[in-house]
Image (spheres, grey):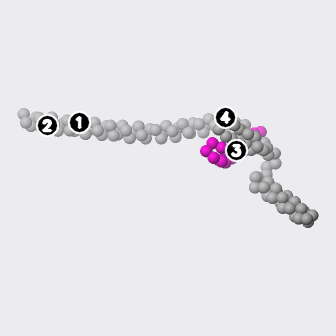
């Protein structure tokens, strides 16, 4: 009788240990399932964006603060610089589809500015 009660107690301990392991393994599966679902959602969104082939392309985004940013957007070959805040979107400048990079445009402006300074210095 004593042996059977010890055997029953041992079986309960094994049963409890087995239940704990089942819970731990289930928790690990659930925790691994969350990133897998996020990865799949991101992948499907990327595929939808490729299939949509929107005529509006975001070329570059520069954050200016927590809710403010500058965005360079291309629409039908024309580039637009817009300012985006939480309350509004403002058109700042349009760039023709000349194919020039921003750096080359800035160099041209700098050269024009330096030649203007030299010509103004001669007049003084």
Residue bearing the label numbered 3: 71
From the image, state whether disc 3 or disc 2 is nearer to you. Answer: 3
Between discs 4 and 1, the one toward the N terminus: 1
Is residue 71 covered in magenta? yes
Q: Secondary structure at mark 3?
A: strand
Instruction: State the CA–CA distance, disc 4 to disc 1.
Output: 55 Å
Residue bearing the label numbered 2: 7
Residue 52's tag is 4
From the image, state whether disc 1 or disc 3 is nearer to you. Answer: 3
Q: Residue at x 67, y 36 (%)?
A: 87
Q: Residue at x 7, y 36 (%)?
A: 2
Q: Secondary structure at mark 2?
A: helix
- Asked if residue 80 lies left or right of residue 117, the reply is left
Region in magenta: 58-76
Q: Secondary structure at mark 4?
A: helix
Between discs 2 and 1, the one toward the N terminus: 2
Instruction: State the CA–CA distance, disc 2 to disc 1.
Output: 12 Å
Residue 15's tag is 1
Looking at the figure, which quarter contains the N terminus? top left
């Amino acid at each position: 009788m004593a042996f059977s009660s010890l055997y029953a107690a041992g079986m309960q301990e094994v049963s409890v240990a087995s239940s704990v392991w089942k819970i731990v393994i289930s928790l690990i599966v659930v925790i691994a399932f969350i990133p897998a679902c996020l990865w799949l959602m991101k992948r499907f969104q990327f595929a939808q964006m490729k299939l949509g082939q929107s005529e509006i392309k975001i070329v570059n985004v520069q954050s200016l603060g927590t809710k403010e940013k500058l965005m360079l957007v291309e629409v039908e070959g024309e580039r637009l610089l817009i300012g985006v805040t939480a309350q509004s979107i403002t058109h700042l400048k349009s760039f023709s589809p000349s194919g020039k990079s921003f750096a080359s445009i800035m160099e041209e402006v700098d050269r024009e500015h330096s030649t203007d300074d030299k010509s103004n210095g001669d007049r003084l």
